[in-house]
């Protein structure tokens, strides 16, 4: 029997293949690869570029302005779609490709699927070096694209047309595997992209990738249940896995039945509505007082879908009970085994349902439950005071967050990534919907904010998307505003001007270095950057990129601007200046940032002494 084949270029075959991939979970199917973002150069224009034009009706093409930005768009999209869909990103070779490396690291750190298609040097090696070729000492088969290896969960280079089918199937497997997912990179030599080959017709059949919900192994589940039943001070720490697995109802049911209090990581914030009596809010370095207080006493900690980053554990200091034990529910065994836990390798929703059933009749102590409810009330009162501080003449950042929270509808999404705002949002944001809080804190990548927000809006157009971005993060990557304008996608960007790296300034001060090099000011006569403020107008910059801009000079003007922004039908930037000297002091815990052991500065020596004292709190969880 002769099998039918289609004579296509490798790039055409790839695009046609991607257009036919679907994910499915709980019986719901959706396009796995929603479209392809790209910036063309000689490394992809004649291959992938030609194919995208030929198949424009099957795989939608989107332009980006910076290759890093387009990967962040894919990450934002994937996170909003609970990792069930993403974008492909095509780049040229050399700098276009390496610009995507930071985006790849951000996706992988956050366990978010993105498909990267960097162009690569001619496989024929004719006429080397090709423009933008590295000429690595590692040999001619090492190219700039090898930089993607450590930041990718799957990496391949398609050196021959017939390698494509096997590799793309592997790529889709990794993208849709909740335990293995992250950046997937297929390096595509520019000549191979354009070579014709007789691809088997089956490659282009509609293919549905089932996203599994692995069930807990009964023996390990029984051990977890025994530990929880024996707990006097149980605590749940909800991570991103709770949200990706759509387990928030199951979590709520378990909590209502057992009274176990819940604290949240950055990715897990929104797992519980903020006003639920068992909701302790943020945990760890940027945690709420109640969450950290209960963490210090907890004897059994149930980690749900968390990778246990140092911000959640306060660098292994927040769980201070000498007898503390962990149970981790995680789809990835690497995370399930952390902290010498009883490792329930399973989907969060399925595991929560199984735990709920097996824990029937068991409840946490009344006193412990009441303490959680009291913490919830006390924290909300503290947040309210920050929201309504009435600071002047410039408002505080806490008030800006409060005004935004007041203006946001429950389903609206707040986005952020780096600076002092993630901490404040983690502490202060009143989350009312599982998808309402989107702070990229796996890689905390300055420049994620605007493209990440764009990805969210593309994934979920019915929600208003509020992007919170500091002045320095804005300066690092404002360019995808142009993409939002071109795509007619509306974002409301809140640009917080405080003239520099305020967050790192605080860190510098805490480590004795007096905010050295962290303010945006003129170079002074003594060589320091402590002169006057710079004549920088970021509002004008945003307007020049096509955004509708509002400048708010007070908290009331800010509130008015947010109201007006809702009625605008294109991307809006609301510029607000805040007082960097007025920061949020409630909550928080220690973070291990090593301080110089010897120094000529007395403030550094003092900071070192404090550091050494604090470091004694750090624990092994063995
Ligand atoms: C790409 C990148 N470079 C450097 C850092 C380190 N870093 C974290 S926060 C920060 C300052 C951010 O400044 P801004 O966006 O103005 O926010 P602010 O701290 O002033 O609130 C820096 C430099 C980072 N997270 N990402
Ligand atoms: Mg700043």
Image: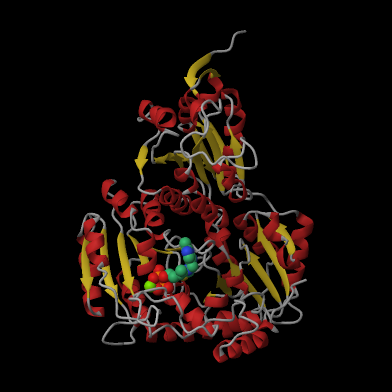
From the top left corner, tell me how far across and down residue 15 is, in percent. Answer: 46, 30
From the top left corner, tell me how far across and down residue 423 is, in percent. Answer: 47, 74
User: What colour scheme governs how the chains and residues are painted in the rendered image of this protein?
Assistant: secondary structure
Residue 412 visible to the viewer: no
Choose top left, top right, bottom left or bottom right for residue 224. bottom right
From the top left corner, tell me how far across and down residue 438 is, in percent. Answer: 45, 62
Q: Residue at x 71, y 82 (%)?
A: 321
Q: Which residue is drawn at 35% across and 41% down?
A: 62
Q: Residue at x 59, y 29 (%)?
A: 159
Q: Residue at x 46, y 73 (%)?
A: 274
Choose top left, top right, bottom left or bottom right for residue 608. bottom right
Residue 499 visible to the viewer: yes
- Nearest to the observer: residue 186 or residue 19: 186
Q: Is residue 419 left or right of residue 63?
A: right
Choose top left, top right, bottom left or bottom right for residue 50. top left
Q: Is residue 273 left or right of residue 485?
A: right
Q: In which quarter of the image is the C terminus?
A: bottom right
- Nearest to the observer: residue 397 or residue 232: 397
509 in relation to 142, above or below: below
156 in relation to 357, above or below: above
From the top left corner, tell me how far across and down residue 286 is, in percent. Answer: 52, 76
464 in relation to 615, above or below: above
Return the residue found at the far top.
Answer: 1
- Nearest to the observer: residue 554 or residue 209: 554
């Amino acid at each position: 029997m002769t099998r039918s084949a289609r004579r296509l270029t490798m790039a055409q075959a790839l695009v046609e293949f991607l257009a036919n991939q679907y994910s499915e979970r709980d019986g719901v199917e959706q396009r796995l690869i929603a479209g392809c973002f790209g910036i063309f150069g000689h490394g992809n224009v004649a291959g992938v570029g030609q194919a995208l034009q030929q198949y424009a009706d099957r795989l939608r093409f989107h332009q980006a302005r910076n290759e890093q930005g387009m990967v962040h768009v894919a990450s934002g999209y994937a996170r909003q779609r609970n990792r069930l869909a993403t974008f492909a990103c095509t780049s040229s070779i050399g700098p276009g490709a390496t610009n995507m490396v930071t985006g790849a690291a951000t996706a992988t750190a956050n366990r978010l699927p993105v498909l990267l298609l960097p162009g690569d040097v001619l496989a024929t090696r004719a006429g080397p070096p090709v423009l933008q070729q590295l000429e690595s000492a590692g040999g001619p088969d090492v190219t700039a694209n090898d930089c993607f290896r450590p930041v990718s969960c799957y990496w391949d280079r398609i050196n021959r047309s017939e390698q494509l089918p096997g590799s793309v199937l592997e790529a889709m497997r990794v993208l849709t595997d909740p335990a293995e997912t992250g950046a997937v990179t297929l390096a595509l030599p520019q000549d191979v992209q354009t070579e014709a080959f007789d691809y088997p017709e089956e490659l282009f059949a509609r293919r549905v990738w089932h996203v599994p919900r692995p069930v807990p192994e009964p023996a390990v589940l029984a051990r977890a249940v025994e530990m929880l039943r024996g707990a006097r001070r149980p605590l749940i720490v909800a991570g991103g896995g709770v949200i990706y697995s759509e387990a928030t109802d199951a979590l709520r049911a378990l909590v209502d039945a057992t009274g176990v209090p819940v604290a949240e990581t950055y990715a897990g914030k929104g797992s519980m509505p903020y006003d639920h009596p068992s909701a302790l809010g943020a945990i760890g370095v940027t945690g709420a007082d109640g969450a950290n207080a209960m963490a210090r006493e907890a004897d059994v900690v149930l980690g749900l879908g968390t990778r246990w980053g140092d911000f959640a554990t306060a660098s292994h200091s927040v769980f201070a009970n000498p007898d503390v034990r962990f149970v981790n529910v995680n789809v990835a065994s690497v995370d399930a085994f952390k902290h010498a836990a009883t490792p329930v390798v399973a989907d969060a929703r399925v595991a929560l349902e199984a735990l709920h059933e097996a824990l029937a009749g068991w409840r946490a102590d009344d006193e412990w439950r009441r303490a959680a409810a009291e913490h919830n009330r006390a924290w909300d009162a503290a947040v309210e005071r920050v929201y309504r501080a009435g600071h002047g003449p410039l408002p505080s950042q806490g008030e800006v967050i409060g005004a935004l929270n007041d203006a946001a509808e429950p389903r609206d999404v707040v986005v952020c990534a780096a600076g002092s705002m993630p901490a404040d949002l983690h502490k202060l944001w009143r989350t009312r919907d599982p998808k309402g809080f989107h702070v990229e804190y796996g890689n905390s990548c300055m420049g994620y904010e605007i493209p990440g927000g764009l990805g969210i809006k593309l994934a979920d157009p019915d929600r208003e998307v509020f992007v919170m971005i500091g002045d320095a993060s804005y300066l690092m990557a404002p360019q995808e505003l142009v993409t939002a304008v071109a795509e007619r996608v509306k974002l409301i960007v809140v640009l917080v001007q405080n003239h520099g790296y305020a967050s790192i300034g605080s860190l510098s001060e805490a480590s004795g270095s007096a905010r050295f090099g962290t303010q945006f000011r003129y170079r002074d006569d003594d060589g320091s950057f402590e002169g006057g403020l710079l004549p920088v107008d970021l509002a004008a910059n945003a307007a020049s990129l096509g955004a509708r801009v509002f400048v708010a000079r007070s908290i009331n003007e800010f509130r008015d601007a947010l109201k007006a922004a809702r009625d605008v039908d294109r991307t809006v930037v609301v510029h607000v200046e805040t007082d960097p000297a007025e920061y949020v002091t409630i909550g928080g815990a220690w973070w291990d940032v090593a301080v110089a052991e010897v120094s000529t500065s007395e403030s550094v020596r003092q900071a070192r002494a404090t550091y050494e004292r604090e470091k004694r709190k750090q624990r092994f969880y063995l």
